[in-house]
Each structure stands twice: as C-alpha cells, then as structure tokens.
Image (spheres, rainbow, N blue to C red):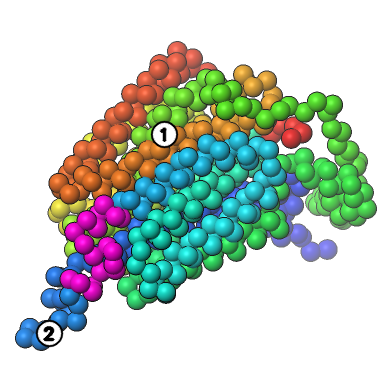
Amino acid sequence: MAPVPPGIRFLVSFNKVQWYRAFTFILTFLLYTSFHLSRKPISIVKSELHRNCSSLSEVQAPSGQPTLHSDADCSWKPFDKGNYKQLLGAMDYSFLCAYAIGMYLSGIIGERLPIRWYLTVGMLTSGLFTCLFGLGYIYNIHSVGFYIFVQIANGLVQTTGWPSVVTCIGNWFGKGRRGLIMGLWNSHTSVGNILGSLIAGYWVSSNWGLSFIVPGLIIALMGLVCFLFLIEHPNDLMTIHAQNPVLCSNSWDAELLLPPDNGSVYVPVQQVVVVKSESEPSAISFMGALRIPGVIEFSLCLLFAKLVSYTFLFWLPLYITKTAHLDAKKAGDLSTLFDVGGIVGGILAGLISDKMGKRATTCAVMLFLAAPTLYGFSMISEFGLGPTIGMLVVCGGLVNGPYALITTAVSADLGTHKSLKGNARALSTVTAIIDGTGSVGAALGPLLAGLLSEGGWNQVFYMLMTADFLALLLLLRLVMKEMTHSKPLPSTAVELKEH
C-alpha cells in the first residue's frame, strides 16, 4: 500500500472545529476586505474630480495650439471651483459622521438580530449606494447634494460590518493568541485599501464611475456569499448536527484516522445534543457596556488614532499628487505602501501584546514613535520618491498598529471581560462603542485636513502629531495599571456558550 502523502496527513491532522474555525477566519477576512475595498475609491477619484488644469494643459497641448482642457471643463462640476477642498472634505465628513452615529446603534441592533442576515443586508445595500456614486458619472450628475446623500446613506449601512465580523471572529477564537490571530485577520483593512486603490486607479482617468461601480458589485456579491456560508457561532453547528442525526452519522461524526501501519478506520463519534439553558443572558445595555473597565479609555484613544489613520486614507493620494506632481493612478498606487506598512504594524502589535500581555503598553509605545515619524514623513516627502516610499511603510505600521489592535483584540477582550460573568452577548455592543467613538475622529480628521490644507500641508501634519500625542495621554492610566500587574494574558480555549 502506497504511503499517504505528507500534505494529506497534514490536512487530516485538523479536527472538524479547527476546519470550521479556519473557514470562518478566511470568510470574515474576505467579507470585511470588501467593505474597505468599497470605501477607498473616493480618495483615488478626488484628484480626478478636481484636476490640475494648468499642468494638464501644458502636457496635452503643444505650444501654439489651443488646449483641449480649460479651467471650466477639466474638473468635474461642482468640484471645479476654488472651494473644492471644502466640498471634498464635506463628502468625507458626511460619510464618516453618518458612520460614527450609526455605529452606536449598529452594535445594539446587532446583538438582537441574526448576524448573518444583518451583515448580508448591510453588504447588499452598501453595494447599491457605492454603485450609485459611480452612476453620477454615467448619468452626468453635478449636484453636490446627490453625492453627499449617497455618502450619508452608505456610511449608515456600512456600520453593519465591523460589529458583526468582530463578534463572529470573537465567538470562534479564544484569548490565548488573540492578538496575533486578530492582527493577521485585521490585515483585511489594508488589503481592502490596496485592492480598492488598484481597482479605482485602473479606471480613474478614463471612466471614474467604474472606480465605484466595480467595488460596489464586489461587496454586493460578497453579501450573497455571507448569506450562504457564514456560521456566526460554534453552537450553530451543534444545533445542525442535533437536528440532522443522519447527516451526523454519515458525514460529520466520522473522523478519518490514518495510522502508519493499519488501513483507514472510521471511528464514529457520539451525537451532540444541545440543551438550551432556562434563562439566557440578555444583551447588555449601552451604559452597562460603558461601565466595563477600559472601554472609555480605549474608545477615546481610538478617536485620535483613527483620526490620523483616516486622514491618510482619504487624503494621502491627493497629498502625493500635489507634492510629488504625479497623476491620480500613480499616486493611488504609491499610497498603497501605507497600507502595506499597516499590515506589518497590525501583526507586530498583536504578536508583541500577546507576548507581553500588555495591550495598552503596546499601543502607547507605537503612538509615541508615530508622532516624530509623521514629522519626518512631512519633511522627507519633499526629497523625492525614494525616501517617501520608505517613510510611507514605517508611518503605516506605526499609525495602523494601535488602531488595528484596539479595534480587534482589545475590543474582543473587553467584550468578554470577567466583569460580565460569562455573558457573551456584550461583544457586538462593546465593539460598536469603541469603533463608533473612533469613527468620530475618523470624521473629524479628513474634515480638518480639508480646512487646514488651505494654509499648507504642514498644518495638517501638526494636527496629526497632536492627535497621536493625545491618544498616548489617554492610555497612560491603563499603562500604569499594566505595569503594576505583570501577569500575561490568560490562555483560554474557545467557550461554546449558547447565544
């Protein structure tokens, strides 16, 4: 009998729960990747909505011949006026303000509805509104009110995403290596930004409407995938098996063992019966979630950390276009390096916090290093592409590292805090409070950037450094508490509580 290939031995070494856990990890990763993929196009298209008309004329028109583009027609109305930065900032603000307000409600609603249905509806409607923005180009719509309405509606429906996927991933993974696992998982933010930049950049100069329509179709398609395949809690599998004993005995309750000498042996497993408890814990209230130790501090810290991250998300391509004199596509491609650094920073933050058992301290150190790095980026970006590329990666890691850690591992830790006494129905609300507060900063950052950039980009970077410093100050109490309690985070298995 031929030996079993090592790859097959590796595959069958995982039990059924581990396979479902890996499947949930990958699926939720792809689902939230599509959310960020659909948010990114606006930052790429900004430089096309208001183009550098004078330089465009010089490039496209030979001397002595009439230009094909004038100040009146090379930009997209109403963004062709001198107040275009304020209008672009208003679009960012309308989306992010709606997102921040909706997030507080989303977590409370999400605790009381099936996650799969809630997330599916959110993704389908988000795809609709993302496509609507792109249809503004197809149907030649020049009303700023239309674009702001679409941004507000999209901001509201996109709040269904984050509390849902964090709750789902928190249900499947315990605290043992939660920082590393969620650091890897949270790279979906940067992967979505990168893919969104590349997709939007492909069409931005020829037909910027497709820069929105294609991502809109992608998130809608992923919404259907969510409806068909998402398993929000391990107990859902037990319920399926209990209700389908034939399925259990024939398929799922038979584990294939491959001993080295004997043949293949099927070992039946006892049928699992799920018994509901008499009194299930009720969903936590908004004020009850705020009383969990650490929720307020991390929420306010995230407000300033997310202010910095989202200012880069919405304004970095335009900043590169203006300072490096690149076209919209090249600036969008270059801006993806910030997200590459964000992937590395999120993973390192999770790994270090797991090893040290100190989430707040890890965030504080990265915030402390981020402020001078931002100043260095503002200086070095004037010396060409080479230094800019390196500093973009470093800034991305230090800016997005704390942001990623707080929105994932910290939120999951607080949502399963010991003060809840085993109530697993607080995770979505806690996640929504933390991310909703952070989204207030995400709304303010791009708006302030649009206003401050009128006086020069240096003022924008001073604002970002101040925000990093304030985020650091808000964590000092928790850092001191961690320093006095040096015990590492406990390593616990996944608890299969009824929900």
Magenta stretch: helix, strand or loop mostly: loop
- Total of numbered circles in the picture? 2
Where is residue 347? Give x, y as percent. 46, 42
Residue at 48% x, 40% y: name it. 101
Residue located beneath label 1 in the image: 302
Where is residue 489? Give x, y as percent. 55, 25
Tell me the SS state at disc 2.
loop
Q: Quadrant of the C terminus?
A: top right
Magenta span: 71-88
Q: Give above or below for 284 relative to 68.
A: above
Point out the residue furthest to the left here.
64
Q: Is residue 77 magenta?
A: yes
Pick the front one: 419 or 98: 98
Q: Is residue 54 visible?
A: yes
Query: Mark 2 vs mark 1: which is more N-terminal?
Result: 2
Residue at 84% x, 51% y: name it. 252
Q: Nearer the viewer, mark 2 or mark 1?
A: 2
Residue located beneath label 2 in the image: 66
Compared across the picture, whether 69 is left or right of 499 comes to: left
Q: CA distance from mark 2 to mark 1?
A: 52 Å
Local crowd size for mark 1, using a 10 Å CA cut-off: few (<14), some (14–19), many (≥20): many
Q: Is residue 35 magenta?
A: no
Callout 2, which amino acid? Pro
Pick the front one: 227 or 199: 227
Q: Are marks 2 and 1 in contact (CB under 8 Å)?
A: no
Point out the residue furthest to the bottom here.
65
Where is residue 240? Give x, y as percent. 83, 47
Local crowd size for mark 2, using a 10 Å CA cut-off: few (<14), some (14–19), many (≥20): few
Q: Is residue 326 visible?
A: no
Q: Quadrant of the N terminus?
A: bottom right
Where is residue 189? Give x, y as percent. 47, 50
Compared across the picture, whether 270 is left or right of 29 comes to: right
